Amino acid sequence: MKQNKLLASIFLIVFIDLLGFSLILPILPFYAIRFQATDFMIGLLTASYAVAQFIAAPFLGRLSDRFGRRPILLISITGNVIGFIILALAPNLMWLFIARILAGFTGGNISVAQAYIADVTKPEERAKGLGLIGAAFGLGFIFGPALGGMLSSWLTSAPAFLAALLSSINLLMVIFWLPESLTAERRQELAHTTRPPFTLGAMLSALSRKTVGPLLYTRFFFGVAFTMFTSIFALWGLHQLNLDEQQTGYILAYIGLLSAIVQGVGVGILAKRFRDQHLILAAVILMTMGLLGWAFTTTIPMLLIILIPVALGGGVLNTIINAALSKSVEPADVGAILGLSSSLESLTRVISPLLGTYLLQSLGNRSPGLASTALLVLLAVYVLRYVVLPESLPLSNNQVV
């Protein structure tokens, strides 16, 4: 009963956090266009948030191992409040960049929430617990983009003001409602655990480890392809289907609904019946099919159909791979490894918006989908070789997995 209460608390906090974040998604490109931003500048604006998050996320994860999950959540949510207020009041493009960079530095709290769930669940229940994070993502994306699109038709800055208000409510919820998941004794035990510092060498070391390296590589390259879709969707929709803010918000809400169903219900069922490795491969294949369809989409009904495998593949992989990572390291390193995973995901949000907007401008509307598909075909081969087959085939001493 206590575990269920804690999971419900963190679910609600993540949901409100993602609701505030997703309010901004459909309107950010149109917001930047008000300040004469080009497509590439919009890509840079999206990437600036991700650069900051890439730098900060592993440190937030490690700091949560040392000082507890709750204080780090408080710091990160406070940063969100300030960032959304600056965004709402931004007088020019420079202040838009400042707002997104600040929000990025303090926005790596999803890895902390995932570590919280890892603290309060048993390994065999980890995938189901982390599925709640995915469900919170999905529900946030059901209401946030649609609401953001509607509010922006009244006042462009209204979604940012509402996001600041929601983040303030979230801050109060953590202060008065969420207990710490790491006891003082447990934090002291973790503090005396020898762990490598966060350096480029430490990151490369983690990528070379047999138990986690292939999972992290899969996380990264899957993220490059998937994020190319999500980060340029509003621009692609404007160019390919002439979608406005409201239509973009409604379609993102549809993606959120699909993701909530997959991650809130489907992942728990699938995790009981299939191995993590097999689910990861299936997710890559589904995403490949979906992004190939995206490349050739010419109508809204066609888009709604191809979004089904996209949402299914993304929902399954983003949940299962974090569950697999959390089970592949010692308890003292759960926050750190999930922070590293979040950091790699943030790196994809640096690369993909820039690459996606370049392809969109230079090679046409189909090129981002075709490039993502080609990358995922190669990734499926890698996952089969280095993630799936090693569980059943004997390996020679010189094979690295």
Image (cartoon, helix red, strand yellow):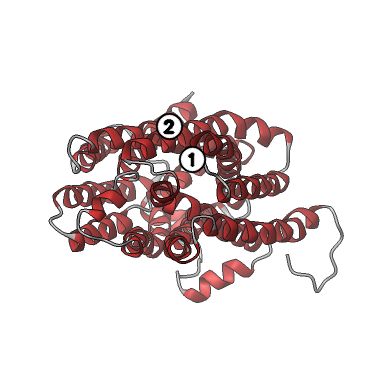
Judge whether residue 98 can be spotted in this image.
yes
Task: Give the residue at x 69% y 64%.
Answer: 210
Disc 1, SS: helix
**Residue 17 picture location, percent across and down:** 33, 40
Asked whether 167 or 152 is in front, the reply is: 152
User: What kind of residue is marked 1?
Assistant: Ile
Seen as rendered, the residue at the extreme bottom is: 201
Rendered view: 208 above or below 127? below
Pick whichever, 17 or 379, lies toward us: 379
Task: Report the residue at 42% width, 44% height from top.
Answer: 113
Q: Earlier in the sequence, mark 1 or mark 2?
A: 1
- Is residue 250 found left or right of 316 in the rendered image? left
Q: Quadrant of the C terminus?
A: bottom right
Alpha carbons under labels 1 and 2: distance apart: 18 Å
Tell me the quarter of the picture where residue 175 sits.
top left
Q: Residue at x 55, y 44 (%)?
A: 297
Q: Residue 50: x, y in percent? A: 38, 59
Mark 2 element type: helix
x%, y% of residue 39?
Answer: 34, 60
Q: How many neighbours does mark 2 have within 10 angstroms: few (below 14), some (14-19), or many (20 or more)?
A: many
Q: Position of residue 26 (x, y in %)?
A: 34, 43
| Disc on res. 370 | none
Q: Are marks 1 and 2 in contact (CB under 8 Å)?
A: no
Q: Residues within 10 Å of mark 1 (few under 14, many from 20)?
A: many
Q: From the image, tell me which residue sits under label 1.
A: 117
**Amino acid type, label 2:** Leu
- Residue 367 location, quadrant: bottom right
Answer yes or no: is residue 129 visible: no
Residue 16: quadrant of the picture: top left
Q: Left or right of 211: which side holds 257?
A: left
Report which residue position mark 2 lands on: 139
Nearer the camera: disc 1 or disc 2: 2
